[in-house]
Structure formats: C-alpha cells, structure tokens
Amino acid sequence: MIKKTVWAAGLAMALGGAVQGAFAAEPVKIGFIATLSTPAGYIGEDERDAFNLAIKQGGGALGGVPVQLVIEDDGLKPANAKQAADRMLQSGVKLFTGVNFSNVLAAVAPGVVKAGAFYVSLNPGPSSFAGEKCDQNYFVASYQNDAFHTAGGVAANELGYKRVVLLAPNYQAGRDAIEGFKRTYKGEVVAEIYTKLDQSDFSVELARLRSLAPDAIYQFHPGGTGINFVKQYAAAGLNKTIPMLMPSFSMDARMIQATGDAALGTYTTGIWSLDFDNPQSKAFVKAFKEAYGRVPTDYAMQAYDTAQLIGAGLKATGGDLSRQAEFRAALRKPEFASLRGKFSMNTNQHPVQDLYLMKIEKGADGSLAPHLVRKLVSDDKDAYAQFCKMPS
C-alpha cells in the first residue's frame, strides 16, 4: 500500500500572521511523489530530507511563502505515481516535484501539465520532454538525462580510453545514457550492453566484459542495482584490469558506503561534488550532516536546489500559482545561490551548467569520497532544446 505523509511546516506561521499580507494566507501545497521504498528508497529519502531542510531553514516557507509538502511513495511503479498525482490534482495541488526515475516521471508529468499545474523535476530529465514534448509548465532543476553522459564521453577521450564498452538499464534514462556518451566519445564503442532496471546478478555481463577486454567501461546503474554491479565487478577482479567510468549518480555517497573499496579509483562525472569550494555548498553539506547524521548525495543537492528554485517562483507570485506567467518567468530567470555554482535555464527550461570529473579516493581520515579533478564542460546545453517550441 502506498504510504502517505504530510509535512505541515509553515502552517502555524501562516495562522500566526508572521507572513506579510502579500503572501498566500494558506500554505501552498507541493505534491512530492518519490520512491521511498524498494532498494532505491534511499534516493527518495535523501531528496525528501534535503527539500525539507530548505523548508526548515526558511521557517516553514520557501521564498517567504508558507508551504505544505504532501508526500507519497510511488514504490518505483509508474501506475502508483500516476494515481498519487491524480489524487493530489483532485485535492487542489497545483505544484509537483519529487519523482526520481524517468519511467515514473513519464507517467506523472504529462497529466500534471495537462491539468494546468506545474511540474519541477529534481532529478530525471528525459530527452522526450526536453525537445518536441517540452511544456511551458514543465521545468527541470537538475539536468537533462544526457548531460552526465556527454561529459563521460569527454572524460573518456581525455583519459585516453580508445575502446570502451557501455552498460545501462534498458529504459529511457539508460538509453539516454548510451546516446549521450556516444555523442561526444571519439573512440570505438566495442559493445552496448543493456541490463534490466531491477537486475541484481551481472555474472553474464561480467563474463562478456572479460572476453571483450576493453580499455575501460562506462556504466550507468543507479541505486541498489549500481551497488550490486560495482561489488560484483570488483569481486570478479575486473577493477584491476578494466577502469570504470560512470555518472556520479552511479556511485553517490550512500553507494560508496555500501561498496567500500570496490569503488576506489573509479571516475565519475557530474554537476557537483562534496568538496565544491563555494560557501553555499559548504553550508549545505554541514547543515545536512547536522540534521540527518549522514553525508548528502547528489540527489540531496539537487532537491535542495529545486526547493530554492521553487522558492524563487513563489516569492515572485506571493504564493499565488494562478499567476502562472509570473511563476514561469521567475523559474526561467531564477535568482538563488545554486549549490553547484553557475546555474541558468535554457530555452527548453532545462539547466545550463558546468560539468566536472571526479575521482573516488581516500581522504586523510581514510574514508572514501569523490574528489574534484577538473572541469570537463563549461555552460553545457542539451542537444534537444533546438526541437522545443516553447510559447513565449
């Protein structure tokens, strides 16, 4: 059964008259549908906790507007997510976020925007919604799915990998990963291996990798699936002969804890790293650790930034989501200090941002963590914006 909780932060503030009259009298409801169960549940947990951290730091508000977070667990099932979104729409929710898998987002976002509500993605950015199917009420605060993978192709070139095998689950984000990597990689793709989204045993794929003997592999497997893959890769001894390159969400902070030394020496690409040297990122990492007793993942960073982006829209409209043009304008030209540094919106309402190379190494205390190596791409824009015909 789908679990349902309601975060009512900010209600007392609204009732107590602490908010200026220009703001909404009642908290703005934000529908937060996420994967909180299954082995991938830690992803939704980090996203929820980081979003809530932003609300707590705002005194129960985002952009000075009181908010009420309505949370449901989709169980990694698109049908569950769609049903949850439909219920929320019927109850009057006009603003949504939270989904962390592309196949689930595909079941939610079209119905939300068709109903005249807003969807702001904190993680997936499938190519299908970045181009011809873009919508004026659909925004992505994280990345377009290809981004980390086009950076992966650039990294493979710079690292001198001439022959590479690509591995990814056979679903939208996995296919985007493969295509994104190939778009910038200049060497030979020896093979493309597609796995199952919930696969746990990779013995067949590992045997094939051994026989193919590439210079390196590029693999995209998030959550529990990725943990299993990296552990089995190391157990087979392949990590000693075939280097591994992957997007950062295939080896996030929680995955590093689960895999241990199996992740040592691997390279990742992404938009942010724990050791980013800007004040807002340092403050976020410190606050998250203090609030939850663990290191934040990339998912947490993206959720926190998404909350700040939504806050910019709420501030511009005083929390009145019927002022849609003003809300959209504020999200298109957001004014907030992104944890990743530079951040702006492209014409298809997906981020323009820098991409980086990290290496997982042991720090002075002996703990494993990704460490920034260098910037790979400046002001990255996805390849699909040219196909987006966005109303002005």
Image (cartoon, helix red, strand yellow):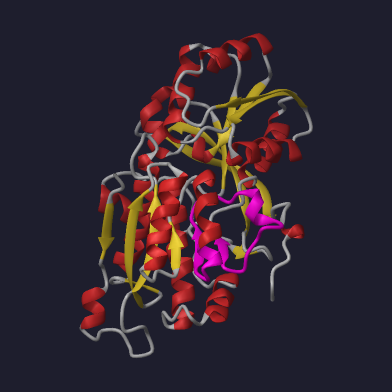
Q: Does residue 159 appear left or right of residue 52 in this picture?
A: right
Furthest-bottom residue in view? 21
Return the residue nearer the eye: 38 or 58.
Answer: 38
Picture quarter with the N terminus: top left
Rendered-image quadrant of the C terminus: bottom right
Residue beneath the point at 54% across and 54% down:
142
In the picture shown, does residue 265 fall above or below 139?
above
Q: Nearer the viewer, residue 36 or 314?
A: 36
What percent of the width, then of the height, locates residue 66?
A: 32, 75
Residue 136 in view in this figure: yes
Image vertical order of residue 146 relative to residue 16, above or below: above
**Residue at x 55% of width, y 81% of height:** 326
Q: Which is more toward the observer, 252 or 125?
A: 125
| Residue 193 lies within the magenta run | no
Q: Is residue 326 left or right of residue 192?
A: left
Q: Quadrant of residue 254?
A: top left
Q: Quadrant of residue 25?
A: bottom left
Query: Where residue 218 sits: x, y (%)?
Result: 62, 29
